[in-house]
Amino acid sequence: MHSPLRHLGALAWKRRPIQLTFFVTRRCNANCPFCFYLQSSAPAPPPGAELDLDEIDRLTRSLGSLLWLAFSGGEVFLRREIGEITRRFYERNRPAVMLYPTNGMLPESIRDSVERIVAECPRSVVLVKLSLDGVGAAHDALRATPGSFEKALECCGMLAPLLARYPNFELGINTVFCAQNQDRMDEIIDFVAGLPGPVTHTISLARGQLRDPSYLELDIGKYRSAAERLAGRLRAGASPMHRFRGAGLKAAQDILQRRLISDTWRARRRLVPCYAGRLNLVLTETGEVFPCETLPSSLGNVRDHGYDLRRLLRAPAAREACRAIAAGACHCTHECNFITNILFNPRLYPALASEYLRLDRP
């Protein structure tokens, strides 16, 4: 595994991004009304507007090494070149972890792409997160996509055998917690716990500019209860952790993260420093760069800066945006941001260590 220790300097010098979320496409084969993709109500860009392989190759040259690379969308695996896109980042930026969220509706294509990726990128952890927001018909109804539950299970079944063949492969389930499924979380947690293989389970709080804002009218107490149940299962050794080195630390971070997210929701203000724009960046399929996917103002487009991300981040607009974020001009519950906000904030280490020591680790 590419060592995460390469990024210890970021504890003191938060000067360049080490976590990138790349929305490789806005295209999707599901109709989820709670989609929180950046400006999700906006129309899809015209054909040919997505960054092509040559453009992606050029921008990887200015990015430097990465700790965490999250591909997103849209449906990631609708981007036919996802394997080749991954290879460019792997060779140039050596990410320790690469994340692929998916609705699982293209089981065979997803399996083939994932197997190619894990085989060609042996020093990166390849983490596939299947979306499961309900059990059976409840999942299909919530996502307004008939047949999506069975496809997700089929995909899970096709991916599970790769766990035995590739030590760098991780398989997980993610559940979007929203108003419409908050009363069924115990059922979902129990169902995921019964899936074969070491399948991890996370929950993500609905957020952003939703097509239907009623999904955000949730009871944060119920989120906290679901989070505590997942934490309890991890502490008791009843739920699998990741298999990579440092998995216990990641599990402890997940537990602390969900507690901070619920506290932030209640307080309606930021409770810990945010490193968006400094350690974290978001790149859209058309080349727009954002410090965070929940903020509406672009820092600029890589096409206008010679595909040089460092040059873009030195521009006055980007510097001003980062200063505003550091000063506390916004707050959110974005899980990806909380990863770096916890792991690179020494003031949170006592709480992180406390959660780590409570885990029943193998």
Image (tube, rainbow, N blue to C red):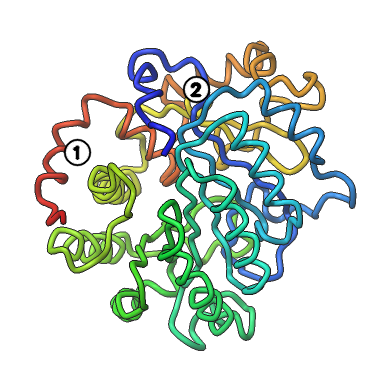
Q: Quadrant of the C terminus?
A: bottom left
Disc 1 marks which amino acid?
Leu
Quarter holding the N terminus is top left
| Residue found 20% across the figure and 60% down from its top | 234
Judge by depth and name the residue closer to the eye, 320 or 83: 83
Left or right of 232? Residue 143 is right
Label total for image: 2
Query: In the drawing, what numbered circle is on residue 121?
Result: none
In this rendered view, identify the residue nearer to me: 127 or 48.
Answer: 127
Q: Position of residue 163 (x, y in %)?
A: 42, 64
Question: SS at mark 2?
Answer: loop
Q: In the visual, does 228 lie left or right of 199?
A: left
Q: Which residue is mark 2?
A: 278
Q: Secondary structure at mark 1?
A: helix
Identified at 68% across, 30% down, the residue is: 298
Q: Are marks 2 and 1 in contact (CB under 8 Å)?
A: no
Residue that sits furthest to the right in the current view: 47
Residue shown at 86%/44% (left/top)? 49
Q: Residues within 10 Å of mark 1 (few under 14, many from 20)?
A: many
x and y, in percent, of residue 15 in the image = 48, 15
Nearer the N terminus, badge 2 or badge 1?
2
Could you say which is closer to the camera, residue 173 or residue 268? 173
Disc 2 residue type? Arg
Q: Quadrant of residue 59?
A: top right
Examine the rendered structure and indicate whether residue 51 appears above or below residue 141: above
Dot 2 alpha-carbon crowd within 10 angstroms: few under 14, some 14 to 19, many 20 or more: many
Image-based side of 340 in relation to 118, left or right: left
Q: Which label is found at residue 352? A: 1
Give the percent coordinates (x, y) of residue 81: 75, 51
The CA span between labels 2 and 1 is: 22 Å
